Image (cartoon, grey):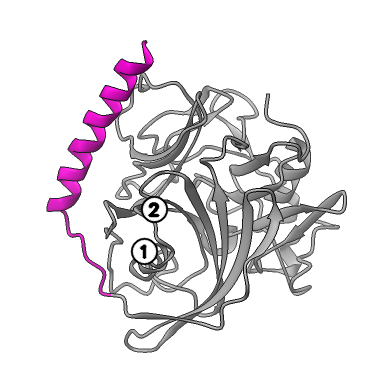
């Protein structure tokens, strides 16, 4: 398909989405303050890291978290997104984001899609345990999990229609993708979250009075994109002391400057890891208790915790920093 036609189709899609977003419940009831930010630290060319304490005033108690923020210059042409491939068919093997990072020689990695296994990822014995992903996922230009995917074990009432994608020409977008048929755009990488948090610069973060792990305050992994689509933010929210709700997470992404943002998997799955000294180092504090850790994979941030086996990960490759995805 000619690139001009593709651009026109994308413009039409996003015009329709913007109209829908304008009529949606585009508000944030979150009242959050951002305290004691660290100075931005350059990790790799075009990638910086910053930590900031977020305090949101909500009843019955304040919600507090440490936000770990990666700012990534995806407009530079030197950044490539990568994602996990299925072990067989649409079946993924549970693995650690740090293992994905070292296997693909990525500079950075975070956990990505929610996944269907909801009982066995707490046990180190379940490494490689088969699972399926919730929502669309593309790796190396190949669809690994179809749009709208909700296999048994994925929450049927979650939309799973908000995706972070990179096109063949390197352009990064966040878009809605809730049809079961593959779109015609030349997408190389795609990961999908449970909900769209921000669209058109306005909060769409679902507010819920529920105190469940998903809707209540919790650790979270988020992805957001600037209006000019040149800056990608990946954010990991720690559990301590309480974590944030989805509505509050949307407020964090708006504070960063995101025009669009999605909620990836969170809770014990929330992981942000970087390549370091031939190995890896955690940037956040993965919240799973140490008794569930795989041998040799404790968190260097807190030896009492570790990262969780997940269905899929998202990798960031920086030109000149190790291998690029095939």
Instruction: Write the residue at 42% across / 46% down.
Output: 154
The chief SS type of the magenta part is helix
Compared across the picture, whether 222 is left or right of 306 comes to: left
Residue 7 lies within the magenta run? yes
Q: Determine the secondary structure under disc 2.
A: strand
Residue 314, how many percent across, how many down?
59, 43
Q: Is residue 76 visible from the viewing direction of this image?
A: yes
Which residue was labeled with disc 1?
Answer: 254
- The residue located at (29%, 50%) in the rendering is 157
Seen in the picture, residue 111 relative to 214 is either above or below; the reply is above
Q: Quadrant of the N terminus?
A: top left
Q: Nearer the viewer, residue 72 or 194?
A: 72
Q: Which mark is residue 261?
A: 2
C-alpha separation, residue under disc 1 versus residue under disc 2: 8 Å
In the image, residue 321 sits, relative to residue 221, either above or below, namely above
Q: Where are the magenta residues, as a range?
A: 1-29
Figure quadrant of the C terminus = top right
- Locate residue 192: give its quadrant: top left
Task: Estimate the x, y position of residue 193 in percent, counting from the top left.
Answer: 42, 48
The foreground one among 253 and 114 is: 253
Q: Position of residue 84 (x, y in %)?
A: 62, 35
Mark 1, other Cα within 10 Å: few <14 / some 14–19 / many ≥20:
many
In front of the other: label 1 or label 2? 1
For residue 318: magenta? no
Of the two numbered discs 1 and 2 on the same chain, state the one appearing first in sequence.
1
- Could you tell me if residue 121 is visible in this image? no
Q: Is residue 142 above or below residue 130?
A: above
Residues at circles 1 and 2 in contact by the CB criterion of under 8 Å: yes
In the rendered structure, find residue 266 and report the number of the disc placed on it.
Answer: none
Which quadrant of the figure has residue 282? bottom right
Which quadrant of the figure has residue 39? bottom right
């Amino acid at each position: 398909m000619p690139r001009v036609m593709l651009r026109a189709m994308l413009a039409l899609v996003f015009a329709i989405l913007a109209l829908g977003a304008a009529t949606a419940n585009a508000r944030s009831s979150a009242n959050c303050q951002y305290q004691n930010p660290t100075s931005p630290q350059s990790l790799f060319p075009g990638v910086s890291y910053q930590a900031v304490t977020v305090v949101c005033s909500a009843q019955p108690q304040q919600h507090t978290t440490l936000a770990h923020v990666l700012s990534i210059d995806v407009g530079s042409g030197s950044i490539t997104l990568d994602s996990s491939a299925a072990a067989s068919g649409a079946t993924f093997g549970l693995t650690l984001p740090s293992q994905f990072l070292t296997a693909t020689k990525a500079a950075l990695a975070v956990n990505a899609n929610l996944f269907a296994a909801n009982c066995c990822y707490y046990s180190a014995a379940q490494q490689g345990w088969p699972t399926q992903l919730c929502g669309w996922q593309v790796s190396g230009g190949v669809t690994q999990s179809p749009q709208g995917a909700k296999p048994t074990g994925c929450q049927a009432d979650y939309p799973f229609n908000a995706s972070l994608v990179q096109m063949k020409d390197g352009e990064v977008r966040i878009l809605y993708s809730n049809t079961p048929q593959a779109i015609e755009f030349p997408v190389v990488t795609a990961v999908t979250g449970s909900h769209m948090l921000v669209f058109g610069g306005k909060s769409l973060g679902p507010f819920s009075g529920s105190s469940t792990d998903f809707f209540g305050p919790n650790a979270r992994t988020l992805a957001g994109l600037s209006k000019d689509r040149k800056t990608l933010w990946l954010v990991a929210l720690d559990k301590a002391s309480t974590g944030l709700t989805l509505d509050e997470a949307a407020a964090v992404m708006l504070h960063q400057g995101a025009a669009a943002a999605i909620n990836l998997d969170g809770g014990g799955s929330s992981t942000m890891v970087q390549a370091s000294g031939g190995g890896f180092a955690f940037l956040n504090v993965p919240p799973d208790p140490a008794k569930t850790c795989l041998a040799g994979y404790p968190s260097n941030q807190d030896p009492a915790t570790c990262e969780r086996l997940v269905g899929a990960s998202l990798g960031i490759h920086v030109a000149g920093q190790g291998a690029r995805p095939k």
